[in-house]
Image (cartoon, grey):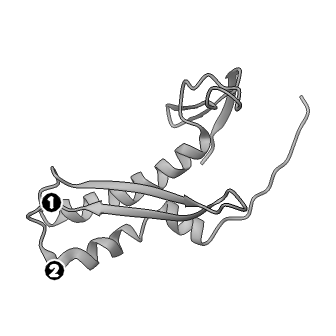
């Protein structure tokens, strides 16, 4: 996969790929942004939630379980010393008609999320530069 990262002004940084543009910005205030789009780290967290969500949705749809009342909430806890996130909680709110026998199975399905698996087994990063 290839993405082109562009810098449209101030603190905005966009990623272009597959005919899409994902816009990011920094918050207003000390970060110096315009607050016109989510910050890159917020998109990182959103990718975790939406990835787990698509696995939960697929699990439900495959079993023809209604999804209208299904909700997924992602919350984070930060380490006070490092200011890094120390815990991410995904809380799947199941619809009332959800069969109890599938509770563990839907959690296992969400565990298959590719974003989460890449965090658990991170890729190697290589950063290079070129002039011109």
Residue identifier under label 1:
95
Q: In which quarter of the image is the C terminus?
A: top right
**Residue at the far top in the pictured view:** 9
**Residue at the far right in the pictured view:** 131
The image position of residue 62, as x and y in percent, is 18, 64
In the image: residue 99, left or right of residue 13 = left
In the image: residue 101, left or right of residue 46 = left
- Of residues 2 and 21, the one nearer the viewer is 21
Q: What's the distance in space between the residues labelled 2 and 1, CA to CA?
A: 14 Å
The residue positioned 72% from the left and 61% from the top of the image is 82
Seen in the picture, residue 14 relative to 52 is either above or below; the reply is above
Figure quadrant of residue 67: bottom left
The image position of residue 56, as x and y in percent, is 29, 62
Within-10-Å neighbours for mark 2: few <14, some 14–19, many 20+: few
Residue identifier under label 2:
101
**Residue at the far left in the pictured view:** 97
In the image: residue 43, left or right of residue 99 = right
In the image: residue 39, left or right of residue 81 = left
Within-10-Å neighbours for mark 1: few <14, some 14–19, many 20+: some
Q: Residue 34 carries which label?
A: none
Q: What element carries label 1?
A: loop
Callout count: 2
| Front disc: 2 or 1 | 1
Figure quadrant of residue 79: bottom right
The residue positioned 27% from the left and 79% from the top of the image is 104
The image position of residue 4, as x and y in percent, is 66, 35
The residue positioned 30% from the left and 62% from the top of the image is 92
Give the mark nearest the N terminus, 2 or 1. 1
Asked whether the beta carbons under mark 2 and mark 1 sit within 8 Å of each other, the answer is no
Q: What element carries label 2?
A: helix
């Amino acid at each position: 996969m290839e993405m082109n990262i562009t810098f449209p002004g101030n603190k905005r940084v966009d990623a272009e790929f597959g005919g899409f543009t994902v816009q990011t910005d920094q918050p207003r205030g000390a970060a110096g942004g315009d607050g016109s789009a989510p910050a890159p780290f917020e998109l990182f967290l959103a990718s975790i939630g939406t990835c787990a969500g698509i696995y939960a949705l697929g699990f439900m749809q495959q079993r023809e379980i209604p999804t209208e009342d299904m909700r997924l909430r992602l919350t984070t806890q930060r380490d006070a010393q490092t200011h890094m996130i120390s815990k991410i909680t995904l809380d799947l709110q199941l619809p009332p008609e959800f069969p109890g026998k599938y509770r563990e199975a839907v959690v296992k399905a969400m565990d298959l999320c590719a974003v989460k698996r890449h965090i658990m087994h991170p890729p190697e990063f290589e950063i290079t530069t070129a002039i011109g």
